[in-house]
Image (cartoon, rainbow, N blue to C red):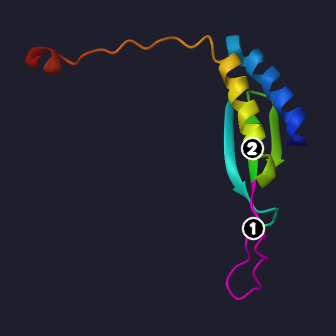
Amino acid sequence: MVLLSNEEFMSQLMLLAQNSKDKSSFTVTFKRYDGNDKPQPREGHPRLPQPDEYMCLIRAKSKNKKLSTVVKKNDVPRVMENYARIMKICMDGLKRVKKVKSKAKAAQG
């Protein structure tokens, strides 16, 4: 997995979304991140130190490409604004799903 800066992640996410528009899909996940790359030790062993502030780990994955970035607490509003703009631009090809009434509901009403 490639750890990128926030700006580069957003530009790569835009390319990933545009490329997967026609032929595949992609997922984006958000996770609280404390900066520790190691798992918590078992009972009886010293615990890892708790961070002063948590960060946000954002991962994007398509069929054959993985991206990630770590966003600090102060940068979250700016990054989320950029993320929302990218999703609005790239999610224009969604198809409207027609609601189908079940037979029971159609008979009642």
Q: Is residue 69 visible?
A: yes
- Check residue 52 for magenta coloring: yes
Of labels 2 and 1, earlier in sequence is 1
Is residue 8 or residue 67 the one in the foreground?
8
Crowding near pointer 2: few (<14 within 10 Å), some, many (20+)?
some
Can you say whether 24 is above or below 55 in the image? above
Residue underneath mark 1 = 39
| Prevailing secondary structure of the magenta residues | loop
Q: Report the Cα–Cα distance between label 2 and label 1.
A: 19 Å
Q: Quadrant of residue 51?
A: bottom right
In-image side of 51 versus 2 (left or right): left
Residue 54, horizontal then vertical, whole percent: 74, 61
Judged by depth in the image, the label closer to the viewer, 2 or 1, is: 2
Can you say whether 7 is above or below 49 in the image? above
Crowding near pointer 1: few (<14 within 10 Å), some, many (20+)?
few
Which amino acid type corresponds to the residue marked 1 in the rendered image?
Pro
Residue segment shown in magenta? 39-55
Residue 71 is labelled as none
Residue underneath mark 2 = 58
Can you say whether 92 is above or below 70 in the image? above
Q: Quadrant of the N terminus?
A: top right
Is residue 55 or residue 17 the one in the foreground?
55
Q: Residue at x 90, y 41 (%)?
A: 5
Q: Is residue 59 visible?
A: no
Is residue 108 or residue 2 the one in the foreground?
108
Which amino acid type corresponds to the residue marked 2 in the rendered image?
Ile
Q: Residue at x 75, y 81 (%)?
A: 47
In-image side of 12 versus 108 (left or right): right
Q: Quadrant of the C terminus?
A: top left
Residue 97, horizontal then vertical, whole percent: 43, 14
Residue 99, horizontal then vertical, whole percent: 34, 15
- Check residue 20 for magenta coloring: no
